[in-house]
Amino acid sequence: MLKNYLSRIIILMPVLLITMVVSSLETYCDPTATVYIEPPEISGLTVGENFTITVPVADVSDLAGWEFSLYFCSRVINVVDADEGPFLKNVRNTIFVSVNVTNNYNITHGLVRLACALLQSGHGADGSGTLATIDFTVVGVGQTPLHLPQNETKLRDSTPMPPGPQPIPHTTVDGLVEVLGNDIGVTNVKLHKTITNDTNVQTDVTVLNYGDYPATFNVTLYYDENEIQTQTITDLPSENSLNLTFIWNTTPVPKGNYTVKAYAPPIEGEVLIENNLLVGGWIMETIMGDVTGDGQVNILDISLVAMAFGAKLGDPNWSPNADINNDKEINILDISAVAIHFGEVDP
């Protein structure tokens, strides 16, 4: 019986050892330190107002160096300045680096990337404290997270070489900034033709209510400084977009090149107005049958229509400029329109 009992212990020992090791690893790897934004949420701001956040760390042991990246929506807020907090400086001298502080990290976001380390060897900082302070200014209406990606946040201890500073397990917590107010914008202007010959031209315009309240406003389509048409949008809900269709009869328009743009005049309380105007492109009004826009009707125009012959709107070989009569199909009527005016030159 004793032999069987000992055998069971021998068999179970590896299992017990593995369990103890795994349990120990889980305890070691379980992150207790937290990097976060303070205050976690900021609201009630207005455009033009400045504010400051801090990036603290909590419950850390032997912190000798840190690095983090903070992303934000640059349409709502812009970074003004960033500086080191006192947490490591209270231990001894540090080196602080503003790796990247920009409002133009990409087309939509800005970035604050900072790093700091203790100079000389010795134990790091313990407990909780402020790693950095960051100053912002409000430039637009809306919400933006203050995003701290965990994979871009690094904490290191003071382990000497070799093996050198070791990573400190931690978590990150994002913040949020909310700016209330009115804000509308034109987000897209799509021309269905760029070459016209005394005909109707369709232009699609998309508008968006960036603000926090329903918005009623006008949208006007222009060629150069000449008004084509104005439409009124009533009570467009917050964070909703709307597609508008404008039809422009170019018959009375003199021949020439024109810039087409859409404009939504600012509404009450709107401060960010840079996105209220959007240029969609240009249109050339030329003689009938001129598909290329070179001011004459020749074999090039017939060739372009012939290449798209039989195509309908949405087909891969569809060419809107070749649809001279605007029936959304390129057929014998379009070929005939070119042929009738073959050889003509714009005087």
Image (cartoon, rainbow, N blue to C red):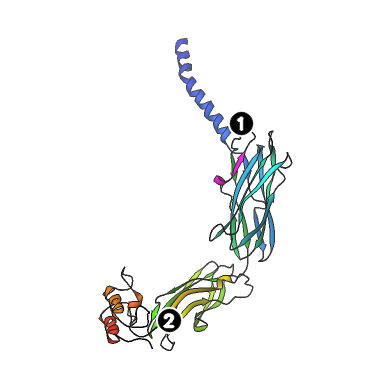
Place of residue 120 in the rendered image (x, y in percent of width and height, measured from the top left): 69, 36
Q: Is residue 132 visible?
A: yes
- Quarter of the figure with residue 286: bottom left
Amino acid type assigned to the residue bearing label 1 in the image: Met
Q: Is residue 1 visible?
A: no
Place of residue 226 in the rendered image (x, y in percent of width and height, measured from the top left): 51, 84
Q: Residue, x 65% and y 34% (percent of image)?
A: 158
Quarter of the image for the C terminus: give it. Answer: bottom left
Place of residue 267 in the rendered image (x, y in percent of width and height, measured from the top left): 60, 75
Circle 1 sits on which residue? Answer: 161
Circle 2 sits on which residue? Answer: 247
- Mark 2 packing: few (<14 Cα in 10 Å), some, or many (20+)? some
Place of residue 278 in the rendered image (x, y in percent of width and height, measured from the top left): 52, 73
Please, what secondary structure does the residue beneath circle 1 have?
Answer: loop
- Mark 1 packing: few (<14 Cα in 10 Å), some, or many (20+)? few
**Quick one: label 1 or label 2, which is nearer the N terminus?**
1
Asked whether 202 or 144 is in front, the reply is: 202
Please state the extent of the stretch shown in magenta in the rendering: 150-158
